[in-house]
Image (tube, rainbow, N blue to C red):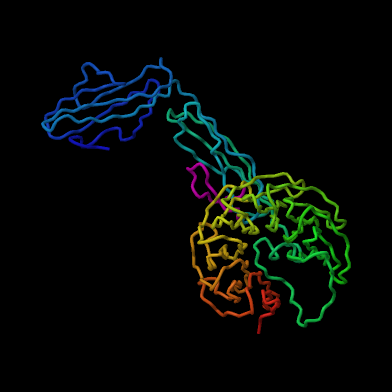
Amino acid sequence: MLSGCIISTSPKDNPVVLLPGQAKTFTIRVLPQPAKYVWYVGGNVVPGATVNSFAYMIDDVLLPSDFTIEVRATTLLGIDKYTWNVHYVGTNKPPVAEAGPDQITYVGYTVTLDGSGSTDPDNNIISYHWEQIGGSQVTLSNQNVVKPHFVADVPGESSLTFELKVTDAGDLSSTDTCIVTVNSMPSPTPGWTMFRHDRQHTGRSEYVGAQVATQKWAFTTGDYVQSSPAIGSDGTVYVGGEDNKVYALDGETGNQKWAFTTGGGASTSPAIGADGTVYVGSFEGIIHALDGETGNQKWAFTMAGYVSSSPTIGVDGTVYVGGYDGKVYALDGATGTQKWAFTTGGWVRSSPAIGADGTVYVGSYNHKVYALVGATGNQKWEFLTGNAVYSSPAIGTDGTVYVGSEDKKVYALDGATGTQKWAFTTGNMVDSSPAIGSDGTVYVGSYDGKVYALDGATGAQKWAFTTGGGASTSPAIGADGTVYVGSYDRNVYAIGE
């Protein structure tokens, strides 16, 4: 910071980096004139340096070091000084570029390139530059940053090659490449294969719901059932019970196909992988992967606390789930191996939702909604609500994230930035997970006993239906637009025209 009689300095950078054999001229301007100058290097007076400019160079004989260059100027106003901190790098060595590992993604997903692993022995990288050198052309967000991103809007089964060049202050550089393989998006699995129907948690079925209240069958478990059923492509119904069991039932008859015994209540909703594997959590703190045909366990992953978040499955088979230990986990669907874990500040009961670009959205007891990179678990953004977020996010076709909070509000957030688009206030806590109609209408329940229909774009209320108790359950939408929801008044309602 300039003060007193000093009106400008050069160089303006502070600290200043010096390379072997590099001359650097240090200059100040002062008012009023005339002035007398004394220069110091490392606290020692430089003989003969008595003007406002001082050229300095280090021969290549010193080890890397840090020191100061100071000038003191005496005018009619008194004595003033300015100090540059100088970093001498010693003999310059080239940097080592690291473009990150090769990646696999899907059409339409956002991909982040990562050059943060690049190093320089002298800690003096001054620039990063990315170039695409192979494959269908995409647009990088910024070619001259450490972590640029792009949207993989190219044909499926494409291979894109990127080169990273890093340069240091001595103009030495090195390059590295990474390859991004872009696959076609898998076709959706028929059925209701996970909590809220799909990865985006729309809660919207492709089938028309029952039009009459005729019971087809009833199956008795050993205790009450909190788990929401999942339905496989063959019609098998998978559901957990508080009797420490997970059941597979024939969808037509209700006959038991198999039952798997857990070490605690299975209150979460099962999720069904593309190969038929059933993933479900329990209060013993374990995520189980079960063979959908036989119920035999394929693997088990243990958390530090019970599981009350329902798993969600990514397009590559990755299983995302939250835990009482405050973490969000990404597990390899085939082996159960942990890919990453992200720590929030509180219990994660919310079920993760996955955007079209692979971003994972989830709420936490610490009042926040998080957006995480699906491949790495790195945080993209966080949004603070006024209370705990038990509601599971739902994602609209334009990427808007809808979620409820115990602060009585329903929020619409920009999926890319986390910026609030709107907030709608109900009369009580909102633990219900929103459902999204084909026209973008958002349906959600509240403990105030009402089910709300909100305009997805503006948050304006379209209508409210009053039940006889708290509506904390999550609505489901049939293909004909009928909204199905339960209430603490012991009723299930079908709301429609």
Residue 87 image point, x, y percent: 39, 26
Q: In the visual, does 490 lie left or right of 175? A: right
User: Vertical placement of 115 versus 269: above or below?
Assistant: above
Placement of the N terminus among the 4 image quadrants: top left
Rendered image quadrant of residue 61: top left
Identify which residue is drawn at 66% across, 69% down: 474
Q: Which residues are magenta?
A: 135-153
338 and 318: which one is in front? Answer: 338
Identify which residue is drawn at 55% across, 71% down: 428
424 and 394: which one is in front? Answer: 424
Residue 119 image point, x, y percent: 52, 31
**Magenta highlight on residue 144:** yes
Identify which residue is drawn at 64% across, 55% down: 107
Residue 282 image point, x, y percent: 74, 55
**Magenta highlight on residue 126:** no
Identify which residue is drawn at 44% across, 29% down: 171
